[in-house]
Image (spheres, helix red, strand yellow):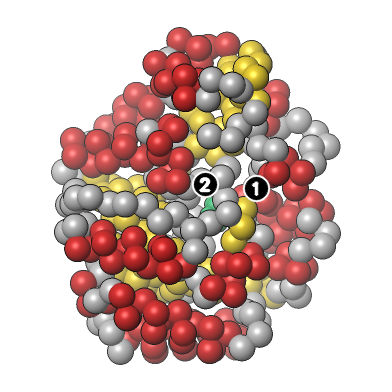
């Protein structure tokens, strides 16, 4: 792995996962710290610059670890919808990523007290079945060879029948088998978007092939056309994308599909604009509705309807979920 500097909380040294991670990056310079926030929350950080020299922070997460899903996120019809934050920030660098407005730093934080997450989930499961998006504030599958966090969530799904786990990714990961209550969610975008806005992610053709192989392996697969980005000639770009997906994947075998136009909390957008003054995505003149920045209502509706219309030729409408 490419981390040259690893900050480790004093108390994190006692955890086997810390040793495991450190042993995989033997050349990194290890710096002992008191608390991850001393590094991660520092004022006046240059987040764009950090993205090119990302440091890793190994820490123990206190307080809340599992959160109620936000209204801008999709629940896919699940009543009890949560997301878990066992890592913060991502190895990829999407220009539109809401994490740019959410965190003051681009460094990555990996929490090693996974047993506490297990206990949190166990507690909540007492109230009934739960749907957990485990890979929202990061890409757990892309980082799994270093952190094992995706394996942890798979193991959780194997242990608890009433826990449904979504692992979302922009990597072309090899899925070898089916765990009935794990959904592998591959986000796909037109190659124009991948090349210009999704730095370091896998090419879209590789993600589509990975999704096709996962279906063949019997896994539950979700395709996410989310966020849809208003690029020039977006109709053609998204039609080509769906044609490419349909050529490799029997879309009728997907568990479901998510469709959503770009949207971001207006607070995050303001912070993103400050940190990235040259970002066209950040500076688009969005409409703010209920604290959420989004495309003009007519455009937003037209984009979602267009993509849904194309998908409906391949997959039942009941399997297509939109965010509004
Ligand atoms: S893959 Fe997802 S979490 Fe990672 S940078 Fe891109 S949008 Fe953000």
Q: Is residue 7 in view?
A: no
Q: Residues within 10 Å of mark 1 (few under 14, many from 20)?
A: some
Residue 112 position, x and y percent, is: 45, 24
Tag 1, which secondary structure?
A: helix
Q: Where is residue 50 in the image (x, y as percent from the top left)?
A: 72, 40
Q: Is mark 2 on a helix, strand or loop?
A: loop
Q: Residue under label 2, please give it.
A: 137
Classify mark 2: residues with Cα within 10 Å, few (<14), some (14-19) or many (20+). Answer: some
Q: Which residue is drawn at 70% across and 38% down?
A: 53
In the displayed structure image, the side of residue 294 where residue 186 appears, left or right: left
Q: Nearer the viewer, mark 1 or mark 2?
A: 2
How far apart, in angstroms, are the residues tagged by discs 1 and 2? 10 Å
Q: Quick one: 23 or 238, which is closer to the camera?
A: 23
Q: Mark 1 points at which residue?
A: 102
Q: Which residue is drawn at 53% across and 89% down?
A: 236
Q: Position of residue 52 (x, y in %)?
A: 70, 44
Tell me which image quadrant ligand 1 sits in.
bottom right
The residue sitting at 71% across, 68% down in the picture is 281
- CB-based contact (under 8 Å), mark 1 and mark 2: yes
Q: Position of residue 61 (x, y in %)?
A: 50, 26
Q: Which of 128 and 199 is in front in this view?
A: 199
Q: Is residue 133 shown left or right of residue 156?
A: right
Quadrant of the rendered image containing residue 249: bottom left
Residue 118, disc: none
Residue 257 visible in the current orientation: yes
- Ranked by sequence position, the earlier of labels 1 and 2 is 1
Q: Is mark 2 within 8 Å of ligand 1?
A: yes
Q: Is residue 26 above or below residue 270?
A: above
Is residue 284 shown above or below 126? below
């Amino acid at each position: 792995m490419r981390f040259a500097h690893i900050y480790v909380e004093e108390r994190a040294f006692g955890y086997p996962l810390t040793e495991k991670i450190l042993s995989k990056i033997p050349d990194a310079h290890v710096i002992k710290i008191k608390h991850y926030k001393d590094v991660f929350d520092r004022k006046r950080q240059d987040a764009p610059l950090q993205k090119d020299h990302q440091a890793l922070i190994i820490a123990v997460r206190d307080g809340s670890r599992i959160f109620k899903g936000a209204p801008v996120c999709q629940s896919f019809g699940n009543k009890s919808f949560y997301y878990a934050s066992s890592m913060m920030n991502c190895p990829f660098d999407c220009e539109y990523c809401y994490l740019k407005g959410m965190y003051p730093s681009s460094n990555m934080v990996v929490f090693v007290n996974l047993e506490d997450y297990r206990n949190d989930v166990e507690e909540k499961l007492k109230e009934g079945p739960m749907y957990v998006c485990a890979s929202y504030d990061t890409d757990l599958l892309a980082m799994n060879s270093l952190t094992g966090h995706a394996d942890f969530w798979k193991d959780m799904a194997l242990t608890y029948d009433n826990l449904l786990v979504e692992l979302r990714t922009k990597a072309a990961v090899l899925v070898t088998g089916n765990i009935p209550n794990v959904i592998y969610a591959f986000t796909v975008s037109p190659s124009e978007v991948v090349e210009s806005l999704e730095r370091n992610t896998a090419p879209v053709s590789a993600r589509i092939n990975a999704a096709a192989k996962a279906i063949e392996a019997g896994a539950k697969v979700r395709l996410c056309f989310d966020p849809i980005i208003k690029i020039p000639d977006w109709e053609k770009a998204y039609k080509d994308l769906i044609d490419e997906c349909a050529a490799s994947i029997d879309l009728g075998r997907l568990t479901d599909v998510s469709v959503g136009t770009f949207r971001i909390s207006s607070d995050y957008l303001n912070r993103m604009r400050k940190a990235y003054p040259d970002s066209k995505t950040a500076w688009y003149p969005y409409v703010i509705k209920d604290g959420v920045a989004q495309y003009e209502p007519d455009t937003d509706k037209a984009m979602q309807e267009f993509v849904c219309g194309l998908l409906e030729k391949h997959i039942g409408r009941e399997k297509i979920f939109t965010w509004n």
